[in-house]
Image (spheres, grey):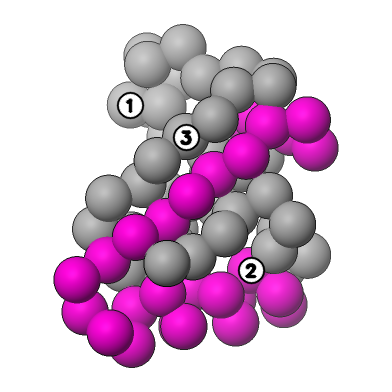
Amino acid sequence: MQALRLAGLSSRMRVLDVGCGAGDVAFAAAGMVGPTGAVTRIDAAPAAPEVARARAAHKGAGARADAH
């Protein structure tokens, strides 16, 4: 994602994805910050973090992309 590259995301960074929806941006960010970084996702819609959490588990990104 161009916006994340322009933001300068790199390994070991911590990222907050506000309004995460299904988690697409969070998954891209998790790939950029790597296993030493972390992404926290939040969304006002009650089901969105659960959907994102399930997708993260399926993608193997759950440890780096926590949903609230």
Which label's residue is closer to the chain start, 3 or 2?
3
For the residues bearing labels 2 and 1, Cβ distance under 8 angstroms: no
> Can you say which quadrant of the picture contains the C terminus?
bottom left
| Direction from residue 15 to residue 65 in the image, left or right | right
> In the rendered structure, which amino acid carries the disc numbered 3?
Val
Give the quarter of the image for residue 65.
Answer: bottom right
Q: Which residues are magenta?
A: 32-58
| Direction from residue 51 to residue 31 in the image, left or right | right
Could you tell me which residue is drawn at 34 percent across and 78 percent down?
48
| Direction from residue 12 to residue 51 in the image, left or right | left
Residue 11 position, x and y percent, is: 69, 20
Could you tell me which residue is drawn at 37 percent across and 14 percent down?
6
Give the residue at mark 3. 15
Q: Is residue 31 above or below residue 50?
A: above
Q: Secondary structure at mark 2?
A: helix
In the image, which disc is placed on residue 3?
1
Q: Nearer the viewer, mark 3 or mark 2?
A: 3
**What whole-number distance in Å separates the C-alpha atoms at marks 2 and 1?**
21 Å
Q: Is residue 35 above or below residue 55?
A: above
Give the quarter of the image for residue 37.
Answer: top right
Give the residue at mark 2. 56
Which label's residue is closer to the chain start, 2 or 1?
1
Q: Secondary structure at mark 1?
A: helix
> Can you say which quadrant of the picture contains the N terminus?
top left
